[in-house]
Amino acid sequence: MMQTFLLIKTPPIFGGILLVIALITMFYGVLQALTQSNCKRMLAYHSVSQMGYILMGLALFMMFRNYDALAASVLHA
């Protein structure tokens, strides 16, 4: 409960910064996964891109205070 309260009190600019980091993480993970021939490395980079999706849900919650984005992020994890 306390962690959610701390997210609500943060300014929306932190959500914007986190959104940029999430987008970079998603695209980097996907592009690196597409270039791999080793299955373990491909799975590892795909996991990196999935962490970007989770961060994006958290960032959208911080920016717009939309609980649906937070719920999607928690359910994805």
Image (cartoon, rainbow, N blue to C red):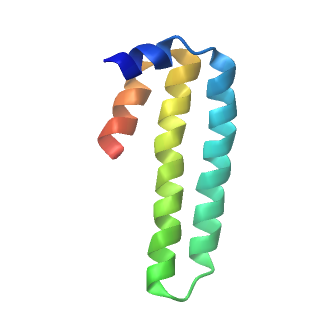
Q: Is residue 58 above or below residue 65?
A: below
Q: Is residue 54 above or below residue 45?
A: above
**Depth check, front residue: 10 or 48:** 10
Residue 39 in the image: state x and y as whole percent.
Answer: 45, 84
Residue located at (41% from left, 13% from top): 5
Task: Indicate the quadrant where residue 3 lies.
Answer: top left
Task: Indicate the quadrant where residue 64 lies.
Answer: top right
Quadrant (top left, top right, bottom left, bottom right) of the N terminus:
top left
Q: Is residue 15 above or below residue 5?
A: below
Residue located at (59% from left, 54% from top): 26
Task: Indicate the quadrant where residue 33 lies.
Answer: bottom right
Residue located at (30% from left, 40% from top): 75
Q: Residue furthest front?
A: 2
Q: Residue furthest bottom?
A: 37
Residue 42 in the image: state x and y as whole percent.
Answer: 50, 77
The count of marks equals 0
Asked whether, in this view, residue 17 is left or right of residue 38, the answer is: right
Residue 23 in the image: state x and y as whole percent.
Answer: 64, 46
Asked whether, in this view, residue 40 is left or right of residue 37, the answer is: left
Q: Is residue 37 above or below residue 68?
A: below
Residue located at (49% from left, 23% from top): 61
